[in-house]
Image (cartoon, helix red, strand yellow):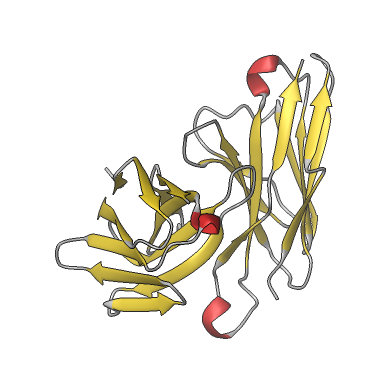
């Protein structure tokens, strides 16, 4: 249980286009999901906290108009990179918090497999 | 400032050997500490989670320790396998309302035949 998927797993796009990344909790519901960005040989950096039914909370320095987050349901959050540029090329990872699960998994964050974005 | 530091930055060992990775943290309030394994191009996968009162926890060949007094944790890998080659990340969860995760920079482990 507690599986998180991301789609697509990798994407290549031209500069100036927009790219949407989906994050789904497959077997549990999550009112809170998180979006991270990871550059090569660096650790994960939190970009924003996605809240179901309300606006996302962005970390300092993250442009909310560039990285649009929509948490449409208890199992789906999307990150749209608008007008992507080469410097947006990175590995994007989402996680879902298991607030509604009981036992040892309660409130644990489960990570997706990541999406590799390359902007040409 | 809430920080998690890991050492060594990278490590190369021979297959079958043991190794120990270190994690020092200055995080307050503390909720729990987790070790993750991240394969190249993949998301992190949880290995162990320890709360304040737990000193050690095992998951197969992985054994984590926690000293809440000195704010140190270690991850010991026994009888390493080639598939253990990955980045190992120490993550501390903040207590209180934020529930934020503070990530270490990771230790890159390479297991050679």
Residue A21 vs residue B19, the one in the foreground? B19
Considering every residue shown, the one lying at the far bottom of the view is: A103
Rendering quarter of residue B30: bottom left
**Residue visible at 27% across and 55% down?**
B22
Depicted A69 relative to depicted B25: above or below: above
Q: Is residue B95 visible?
A: yes
User: B56 or A2, which is in the foreground?
Assistant: B56
Of residues B110 and B107, the one drawn nearer to the viewer in this rendering: B110
Residue B26 can be seen in this image: no
Question: Considering only vertical position in the picture, is B88 above or below A69?
Answer: below
Left or right for B90, reference A76? left
Question: x, y (%) of residue B39?
Answer: 58, 50
Residue found at x 33% / y 63%: B18
Q: Which quadrant is home to the N terminus of chain A?
A: bottom right
Locate residue B111 relative to residue A66 in the image: left or right: left
Q: Residue B57, how many percent across, how many down?
A: 36, 78
Residue B53's x, y, as percent? 27, 80
């Amino acid at each position: 249980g507690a599986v998180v998927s991301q789609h697509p797993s990798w994407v290549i796009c031209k500069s100036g286009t927009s790219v949407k990344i989906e994050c789904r909790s497959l077997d549990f519901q999550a009112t809170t999901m998180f979006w991270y960005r990871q550059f090569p040989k660096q650790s994960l950096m939190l970009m924003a906290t996605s809240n179901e039914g309300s606006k996302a909370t962005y970390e300092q320095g993250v442009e909310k108009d560039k990285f649009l987050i929509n948490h449409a349901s208890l199992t789906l959050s999307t990150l749209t990179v608008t007008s992507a540029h080469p410097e947006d090329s990175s590995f994007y990872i989402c996680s879902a918090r298991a607030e509604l699960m009981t036992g040892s998994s309660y409130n644990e964050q489960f990570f997706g497999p990541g999406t590799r974005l390359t902007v040409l | 400032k809430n920080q998690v530091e890991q050492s060594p930055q990278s490590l190369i060992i021979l297959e079958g050997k043991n190794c120990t990775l270190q994690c020092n943290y200055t995080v307050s309030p503390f909720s729990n500490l987790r070790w993750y394994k991240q394969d190249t191009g993949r998301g992190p996968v949880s290995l162990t989670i320890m709360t304040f009162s737990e000193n050690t926890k095992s998951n197969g060949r992985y054994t984590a320790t926690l000293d809440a007094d000195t704010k140190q944790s270690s991850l010991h890998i026994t009888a390493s396998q080639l598939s253990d080659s990955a980045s190992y990340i120490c993550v501390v969860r903040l207590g209180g309302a934020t529930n934020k995760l503070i990530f270490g920079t990771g230790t890159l482990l390479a297991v050679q035949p």
